[in-house]
Amino acid sequence: MAASELIQDDDDVRPHVEVNVTTMNPPTPPPSRVANGNPTRLASLPPPPPPGDTCDGKKQQDGSKRSSMFKQNQLIHSLSSRLKKRCDYVKISVPEERTNRLPTEWWKTGVAFLYALFNLVFTTVIITVVHERVPDKSVSPPLPDKFFDYVDRVPWAFTVTEVNGLILVGLWLVQWLFLKHKSIIGRRCFFLIGTLYMYRCVTMYITTLPVPGKHMVCAPKLYNDSTGKIWRILRLISGGGLSLTGSHLMCGDFLYSGHTVMLTLSYLFIKEYSPRWMWWYHWLCWLLSASGVVCILIAHEHYSIDVVIGYIATTRTFWWYHTMANTHTLRQAPNNFLSRTWWNPIFNFLERNVQTTVPVTFSWPVALPSSCRQRYRMVEGGRDE
């Protein structure tokens, strides 16, 4: 015979306890002893009831069973109430579903890529325009620079700068491909590249500095030759604006240093979106970035002010953007001065649906075939066993 009881409190609901209670049939009377051929019963056993009292006996037996059940239920209830009082319960809050808190939105990444591409191409146009305004070395000698006073020029130093920059950009590109949330991180990178090079276009155009050293060889000026200028723009784009490729023969793109921007920005993204335990990787990238920036000055390819402004503009823009992106309370705060930047509407467009900090997690850039995934599950199952 089974009985169950649901234990509940008025304040909270806890799992019910089911108890199976089985009552055994009353023990059979011991066999009677036979003495002198006449059966006799033990003195302790009651005499059998008369035939007329059979129903009353069944009722009494049912009543005793019910009373026994009632006592057992009372015991269970008292034990459970004591357990409730003595046990410590920990409230576990179940987090909300986060499936849509980091949407990919690749179309926004595409918009940010077009923004960066436009400003990079526009930079080559501005370099071509500014090159026509650079004063001749015989007329305007290089400006005095304190770093140049103490450090002589090393011709191969600028090659080290460009090699370090290519290594850092390559490392960041591989790291970005293996990031799980590459669409969000990619649009941040493209936006910052486009914004920093747009700033560079403004500073180059409004202030044209003379060449920082007499060693520099500038291409001849074309003046009104529009076709020649277009070919120069295309050549500069095809060579990536690097001296290693022989595509950068124009002068005037000094304030501020584009090489400093790429060296610094690559390191900042590598460090921000890689695990903290990879300290050796961070130090290696920092050494590549720092040595590349110093080699710009050792090669006398930029004034010191070009490098300093490039570093300040890159780091501050990166830190402002990521402060806004990672601190969600600042986005709607009335006294948030960071929201007064001109690019805040663009920031809201790119980050509106990103509701949490982007975690540093990695995944395969290309989905594995179904056969490989099945084998991987089999291996994982074997490990679990």
Image: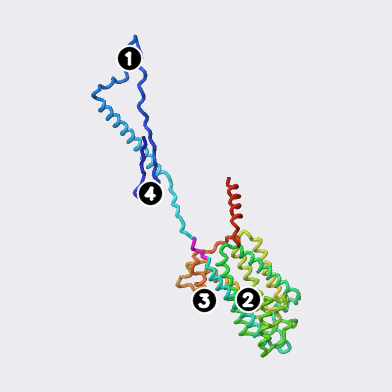
Q: Nearer the viewer, residue 357 or 144?
A: 357
Q: Residue 88: within the magenta?
A: no
- Mark drawn on residue 341: 3
Amino acid type, residue under disc 1 in the picture: Thr
Q: Position of residue 283 (x, y in %)?
A: 66, 64
**Label 4 residue SS:** loop
How many neighbours does mark 1 have within 10 angstroms: few (below 14), some (14-19), or many (20 or more)? few
**Label 2 residue SS:** helix
The Cα–Cα distance between marks 1 and 4, rounded to whole angstroms, is 59 Å
How many neighbours does mark 4 have within 10 angstroms: few (below 14), some (14-19), or many (20 or more)? few
* Quadrant of the image occupied by residue 239: bottom right
> What is the count of numbered marks?
4
Please report whichever mark, 2 or 1, sits nearer to the chain's N-terminal start.
1
Name the residue that disc number 2 marks: 310
**Label 1 residue SS:** strand
Q: Position of residue 317 (x, y in %)?
A: 57, 73
Most extreme residue toward the left is: 52
Residue at x-position 33% and y-position 35%: 69
Name the residue that disc number 1 marks: 40
- For residue 360, side relative to residue 83 (left or right): right
- Mark drawn on residue 207: none
Please report whichever mark, 2 or 3, sits nearer to the chain's N-terminal start.
2
Residue at x-position 34% and y-position 10%: 37
The residue segment tinted magenta is 99-103
Which of discs 3 and 4 lies nearer the camera? The answer is 4
| 94 to 347, vertically: above or below | above
Q: Quadrant of the N terminus?
A: top left
Residue 133, can we see it? no
Residues tagged 1 and 4 counted as in contact (Cβ below 8 A): no
Amino acid type, residue under disc 2 in the picture: Gly
